[in-house]
Image: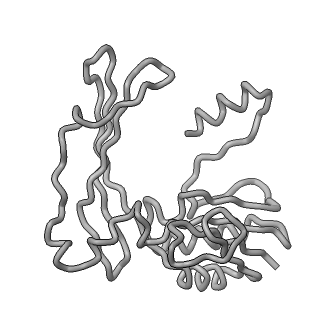
Amino acid sequence: MIAICREKSEREGLSPTLFVQPMHELDPPRTYKTIFVCGGFGLGSDRERDVEALHRFYEHLDRGGTLVLDNENPYSSGYPWRYWRKEERSSLPRAREPLESVDRRLGSDGAEYALQSRLVDLDPLEQRATYEMHAGMWRDGELVRQEEHTLHINFYFMNETILLLERAGFTDIVVHAGHREEAPTGDDDFIVFVARKP
């Protein structure tokens, strides 16, 4: 992702400073007026690190600065909400289909790529899902590389997130529906938190 960002920036004549750091280790050399967190909070982490990430965001904002953080609600259509029920969890882990049966996308390098995920575990008490990720790369129809990784996702509800933001020091927290400046409802898969550092 960073390489793609760098490449697109260079085409536009820009030269941004890009950092590759886990959120809980965020330590850029300066503070900012705004920090955006898009689709990454709770991903590939644990709750302790997520709390630390919120503190890092706070530390690296100017006074009066704003954190904008989006969150996919745990019950959204993109998440495995049904597996929160005990009888549904008994069917985990879900079966894995052959990687060859997954739709492939053509990359800018001419190779074809496929990514497959399967839910392995869901702990409703910890609000945490474990996925197995399987990726493959094909050249001229031949599978030349594949990787397998485990991915954890921590689920956060709206009120829980507001409390975590407040504990990190944020004030004037406003929650928007999706990516619109409207109040959220239970029908919104995504919500966006806008929080200020006093």
- On the image, the x and y values in percent for residue 120 come to 23, 61
Q: Identify the image quadrant of the C terminus.
A: bottom right
Image quadrant where residue 84 sits: bottom left
Q: Residue furthest top?
A: 140
* Quadrant containing the N terminus in the rendered view: top right
**Nearer to me, 42 or 57:** 42
Rendering coords of residue 70 (x, y %): 60, 65
Q: What residue sits 57% from the left and 78% below the top?
A: 185
Marks counted in the figure total 0
Tell me if 7 is positioned left or right of 107 in this view.
Answer: right
Q: Position of residue 165 (x, y in %)?
A: 64, 79
Which of the pair 61/81 is nearer the observer? 81
Q: How is the image coloured?
A: one colour
Q: Is residue 94 above or below residue 171?
A: above
At 60% from the left and 57% from the top, the residue drawn is: 38
Image location (x, y in percent) of residue 176: 66, 72
The foreground one among 89 and 49 is 89
Q: Image quarter for residue 77?
A: bottom left
Query: As displayed, is residue 98 above or below residue 185?
Result: above
Q: Residue at x 85, y 72 (%)?
A: 63
Q: Residue at x 22, y 35 (%)?
A: 101
Tell me if 38 is positioned left or right of 116 in this view: right
